[in-house]
C-alpha cells in the first residue's frame, strides 16, 4: 500500500524568510503524481503544486517550489519570501496510477506558522 | 468558472438520524471523489465515482455509508443512523480525465 509521511507536525518561519516542508512516500510504482495542498483556517483545500514522477525537472509555482528526489522517495516543498497568508496546514499527497485517475493518499500534515 | 460546490457547509444531526451531503463538481468535470477528515488528521479517501458509476469504494465503511453520482444533479454522500464517530469534515473533489483534483469547501458534520 502507498503511504505518505510528513515528519514535521509543526514548522515556523519568519516573514520574508524561506522554509522547507518535508515529505516522504512509499510506492512500488514507477509512475505516479505528487501534490502539495494548503489548508488555511477556512479549511478549504487548495492545490499548491504538483509533480509528475516521470519528469526530472522540479515543479515551480511562483514562490513555491519542490525538491523531488525520486530515488530517495522524497518530495519537499520550499516556500520562498514567506508571507503571513502562507500560514496554514500543508498536506503532501500522492496519487497511485490507476489509469489516469486515482484517489489521493495524504500525509498527516504540517502546520506552518509565519511570524511577522 | 465556479469551483466545486458543497452543501450544506455545516450539518448537525442527532445520533440515529440520516445525513445527506451534496457535491456539485466543477463544470466539465465528470469524476468525483469523497474524502473524510477527522480532527487533527489528514484526509482519507472514501469513494470515487463517475456519472452513474461507483469506480472505487475501497475507503467507504461497509455499513451505513453510501454514495451516488446520478446522470443529473449533484453527487450525494449519505450516512444512515449517524453515530458520534461520524463527526468530521467531509470533502468532495472533482477532476477531468486526467487532471488534478480540486476540492470543495467541505461539509462539517457534527453528531450530537
Image: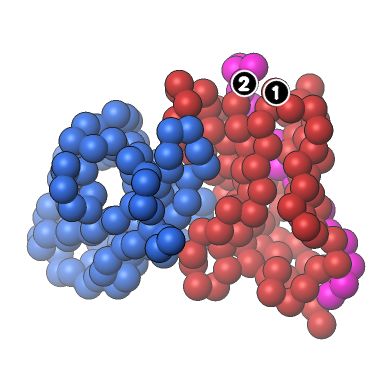
Which quadrant would residue B65 be assigned to in this image?
top left
* Residue that mark 1 sits on: A54
Which quadrant would residue A85 be assigned to in this image?
bottom right
Residue A47 magenta: no
Q: Position of residue B84 (x, y in %)?
A: 25, 61
Which quadrant would residue B104 be assigned to in this image?
bottom left
Which chain is drawn using blue?
Answer: B
Vertically, is A74 above or below B66? above
Residue positioned 81% across, 52% down in the render = A78
In three-dimensional space, the C-alpha distance between marks 1 and 2, rounded to whole angstroms, equals 6 Å
Residue positioned 23% across, 37% down in the render = B51
Q: Are marks 1 and 2 in contact (CB under 8 Å)?
A: yes
Dot label at residue B72: none
Instruction: Please state the chain letter of the residue tagged with numbered disc 1 in the rendered image.
Output: A
Residue A19 magenta: yes
What colour denotes chain A? red
Is residue A86 visible to us here?
Answer: yes
Mark 2 crowd level (few <14, some 14–19, many ≥20, 10 Å Cα): few
* Residue that mark 2 sits on: A31
**Stretch of the chain drawn in magenta:** A15-31
Amino acid at each position: 500500500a502507498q503511504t505518505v509521511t510528513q515528519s514535521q507536525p509543526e514548522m515556523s518561519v519568519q516573514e520574508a524568510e524561506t522554509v522547507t516542508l518535508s515529505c516522504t512516500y512509499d510506492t512500488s510504482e514507477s509512475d505516479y503524481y505528487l501534490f502539495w495542498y494548503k489548508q488555511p483556517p477556512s479549511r478549504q483545500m487548495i492545490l499548491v503544486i504538483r509533480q509528475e514522477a516521470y519528469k526530472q525537472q522540479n515543479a515551480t509555482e511562483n514562490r513555491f517550489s519542490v525538491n523531488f528526489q525520486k530515488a530517495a522517495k522524497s518530495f519537499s516543498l520550499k516556500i520562498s519570501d514567506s508571507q503571513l497568508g502562507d500560514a496554514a496546514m500543508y498536506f503532501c499527497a500522492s496519487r497511485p496510477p490507476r489509469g489516469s485517475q486515482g484517489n489521493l493518499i495524504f500525509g498527516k500534515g504540517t502546520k506552518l506558522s509565519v511570524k511577522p | 468558472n465556479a469551483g466545486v460546490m458543497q452543501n450544506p457547509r455545516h450539518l448537525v444531526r442527532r445520533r440515529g438520524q440520516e445525513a445527506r451531503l451534496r457535491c456539485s463538481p466543477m463544470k466539465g468535470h465528470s469524476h468525483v471523489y469523497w474524502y473524510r477528515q477527522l480532527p487533527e488528521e489528514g484526509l482519507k479517501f472514501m469513494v470515487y465515482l463517475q456519472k452513474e458509476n461507483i469506480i472505487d469504494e475501497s475507503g467507504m465503511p461497509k455499513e451505513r455509508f453510501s454514495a451516488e453520482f446520478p446522470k443529473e444533479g449533484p453527487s450525494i454522500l449519505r450516512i444512515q443512523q449517524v453515530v458520534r464517530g461520524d463527526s468530521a469534515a467531509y470533502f468532495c473533489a472533482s477532476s477531468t480525465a486526467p487532471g488534478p483534483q480540486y476540492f470543495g469547501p467541505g461539509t462539517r458534520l457534527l453528531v450530537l
